[in-house]
């Protein structure tokens, strides 16, 4: 029995809850949604897939993404909800030996981007937000750290987790990075009416930082598009779309729109990846849809 999940804060909390509820001993398998969609992941009978698209080869599936809905019968639970962790928590609450209510609330808040301006600008004052920002997969896999967080969060309250030497070092790096990243975003983001477009294709590797920061810097924008190369050979583009959390007037279902380009996600946030040679075609199309700002769910 393995847990198969994605490397973000929600995925980490999902792994914490499933390890506790089902006494899972095998290492977590960390994968990206696009890897599931492309059939690149070795999914086995007995696997518990969570926070990822459905794969019929697994045994249990828990998810909350709008575009991952399925008509196929499955064991587990799917709901449109703030986090996948919250779904697992409600499903297995009677099997948990510790009180994870606060941790799950944090997963709900962070995955739904239900953050205040102070939480975005000063994450060092907000423990769970700060910890979540140490989980990055933009540059390279960080499996040992993701596994360490699962272990720490199973055993300790958040204050004790933040006292761990490695976690403390990474949190300090996030605080320092946050200040630099604001300047970087200003230099590499343009406005197309009410759409902010951050293009990182000129950088190898692209700098990483607080994904919510752009919304505070461009309050007139209702949505952000972030573009980067996925690989050093610049053969694949990854594109993220996120509704502004401070100017909530984007009418486009981001996940549904990006499903047309091989991606998916939530109504307010999604991602897709495509061959770099398609960039000149796809990127203007996506920006144009967002500029028109029409409801695409009908």
Image (spheres, grey):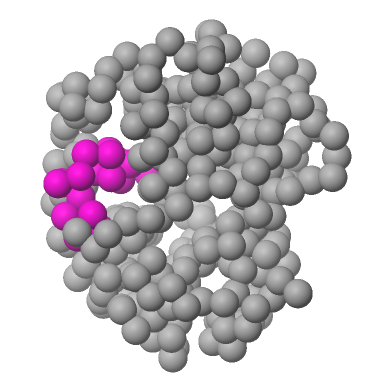
Q: Is any part of residue 84 visible from this angle?
A: yes
User: Magenta includes 125?
Assistant: yes
Quarter of the picture holding the C terminus: bottom right
Q: Which residues are magenta?
A: 119-136
Vertical side of 141 occupied by 177: above or below: below
Q: Residue at x 85, y 39 (%)?
A: 72
The residue depicted at 59 percent of the width and 88 percent of the height is 292
Residue positioned 28% across, 45% down in the render: 129
Query: Residue 295 occupies which quadrant of the picture?
Result: bottom right
Q: Is residue 156 above or below residue 201?
A: above
Q: Is residue 15 magenta?
A: no
Please provide percent x and percent y for residue 255: 62, 62
Quarter of the N terminus within the rendering:
top right
As drawn, 130 above or below 94: below
Residue 236 shows in this picture: no
Q: Main secondary structure of the magenta part?
A: helix
Residue 157 in the image, given as x and y percentages of width and height: 26, 22
Task: Tell how many labels.
Answer: 0
Judge from the rendering whether residue 44 lies leftward or rightward of residue 188; answer left or right.
right
Furthest residue to the right? 72
The residue lying toward the viewer, choosing from 189 and 228, is 189
User: As drawn, is 83 to the left or to the right of 124?
Assistant: right
Drawn side of residue 30 relative to residue 72, left or right = left
Q: Is residue 75 left or right of residue 292?
A: right
In the rendered image of this protein, does residue 252 appear above or below residue 117? below
Q: Position of residue 173 (x, y in %)?
A: 18, 44
Q: Who's the residue at 60% across and 74% down the image?
A: 252
């Amino acid at each position: 029995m393995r847990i198969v999940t994605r490397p973000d804060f929600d995925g980490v909390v999902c792994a914490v809850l499933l390890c506790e509820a089902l006494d899972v001993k095998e290492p977590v398998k960390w994968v990206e949604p696009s890897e599931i969609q492309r059939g690149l992941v070795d999914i086995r009978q007995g696997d518990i897939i969570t926070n990822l698209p459905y794969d019929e080869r697994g045994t249990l599936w828990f998810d909350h993404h709008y575009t991952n809905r399925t008509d196929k019968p499955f064991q587990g639970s799917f709901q449109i909800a703030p986090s996948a962790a919250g779904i697992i928590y409600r499903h297995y609450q009677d099997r948990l030996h510790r009180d994870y209510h606060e941790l799950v609330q944090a997963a709900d808040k962070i995955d739904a981007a239900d953050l205040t301006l102070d939480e975005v600008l000063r994450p060092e004052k907000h423990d769970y937000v700060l910890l979540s920002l140490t989980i990055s997969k933009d540059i390279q896999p960080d499996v040992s750290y993701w596994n360490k967080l699962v272990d720490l969060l199973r055993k300790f309250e958040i204050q004790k987790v933040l006292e761990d030497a490695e976690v403390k070092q990474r949190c300090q790096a996030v605080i320092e990075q946050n200040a630099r990243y604001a300047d970087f975003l200003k230099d590499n983001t343009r406005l197309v009416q009410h759409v902010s477009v951050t293009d990182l294709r000129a950088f190898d590797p692209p700098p990483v930082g607080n994904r919510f920061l752009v919304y505070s810097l461009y309050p007139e924008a209702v949505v952000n598009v972030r573009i980067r190369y996925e690989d050093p050979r610049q053969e694949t583009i990854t594109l993220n779309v996120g509704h502004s959390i401070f100017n909530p007037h984007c009418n486009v279902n981001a996940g549904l729109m990006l499903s047309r380009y091989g991606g998916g996600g939530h109504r307010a946030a999604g991602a897709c990846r495509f061959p770099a040679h398609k960039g000149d075609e796809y990127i203007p199309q996506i920006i144009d849809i967002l500029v028109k700002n029409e409801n695409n769910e009908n």
